[in-house]
Structure formats: structure tokens, C-alpha cells
Image (cartoon, rainbow, N blue to C red):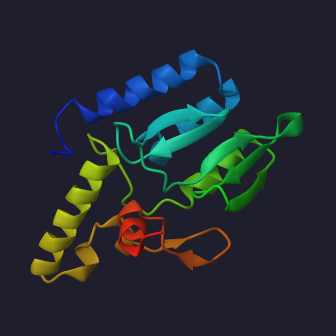
Amino acid sequence: MDTTSPGHAPDLVEAGWQKVRADGRIRPELLEAAYAEPRPRQLFPWTGMGELHFSRCTKWPWTGDIPYLQPAPEGAYRVSGPLRSESVGPAATPRQAVTMVADRLPLDCGPAFVGAREELAVHDAATLSADSEAGDPDRCTSWSRRVVTGTDGARRRPFSFAAAARRGP
């Protein structure tokens, strides 16, 4: 599937942002902060349980490998994920919460892939194979090969559905 179809991915992502705005489940100030940040803005937004999530693909099932934003009491926020059991930490302002997510994205994350996560996994595998054959490991764009350095200085690999499927239950 072509991830660079002119006019398609940006239109789908923008439509996702408009839908999230219209559904009223997310605090408007959080949506504005997320949309103002270029890196999360190029990902596909979706909501669930009052949370703002970001996907690397435009169709369901979406990816679940990026931290997400939750409302907290007194106008504050929590940044969690990517797994439900993981907590990044509290944030006092929408901008701080969005920055915490953006800081955990790989530098080359985005724009959103046109398709579902399974199609993205196939695309990533093909890209990894092509990069390996080219003999340039630094060009590798496979999500599972990336390492993220968080604001805390910790280096970790992002969650990968493809890697989790290979590991099994």
C-alpha cells in the first residue's frame, strides 16, 4: 500500500481530527495543544474512554504503540501507555502532556500510514527487508527496530504488534 498517496493520508488524518473535535469527548484545550504540535498532528487521532490516542495508521484496527492522554482531576492530565499497564506520568497542562507524548515518538514517526495496522506491519517488514538488502542499517524504518529516548533519558524500544505476535501469549 502506498503511504505517500498525494492528498489521501493528510485528508484522512485531518478528517480524523475533525471527527475527534466534533464528538466532544476530549477537553478542547487538549485537542488544540495536540493539534498545534506537528508530530502528533500527523498521526491519526481517536478517542476511547475519554482518552486521546494516536495511531500510526488511518484505519481500524489502529496501532496501540504510542502513549495516550487521559483527563485527570482539576484540569490536569495523565500520560499513559502505550500499554495500559504503563504510566509515563502526570502533566499539569495540555501542552506539557502533548510534549510528553511527542518526546516519546521516534524522529521518523509519521505521517500516518494509509491502511490498518496489519497492512502497516507488512509495509514495515518490506521496508526493513529493503533497507537490509541496501546494506544501510541506519536507514531502517521498521518500528520494531527503533529506539526511543524519553525525556527521562531512558532508551527503550516502542511497543510493536508484529514483535508481540511473534512472541506469542
Above or below: residue 133 compared with residue 122: below
Q: Is residue 73 left or right of residue 163?
A: right
Residue found at the very far right of the displayed protein: 74
Residue 17: % across, % down = 47, 27
Residue 161, quarter of the rendered image = bottom left
* Residue occupying the point 24% across, 73% down: 139
* Residue occupying the point 39% across, 48% down: 56
Q: Is residue 72 left or right of residue 79?
A: right
Residue 76: % across, % down = 82, 41
Above or below: residue 164 compared with residue 153: above
Residue 1: % across, % down = 15, 46
Judge by depth and name the residue closer to the eye, 78 or 119.
119
Above or below: residue 72 compared with residue 67: above
Q: Is residue 131 left or right of residue 46?
A: left
Residue 116, quarter of the rendered image = top left
* Residue occupying the point 48% across, 73% down: 157
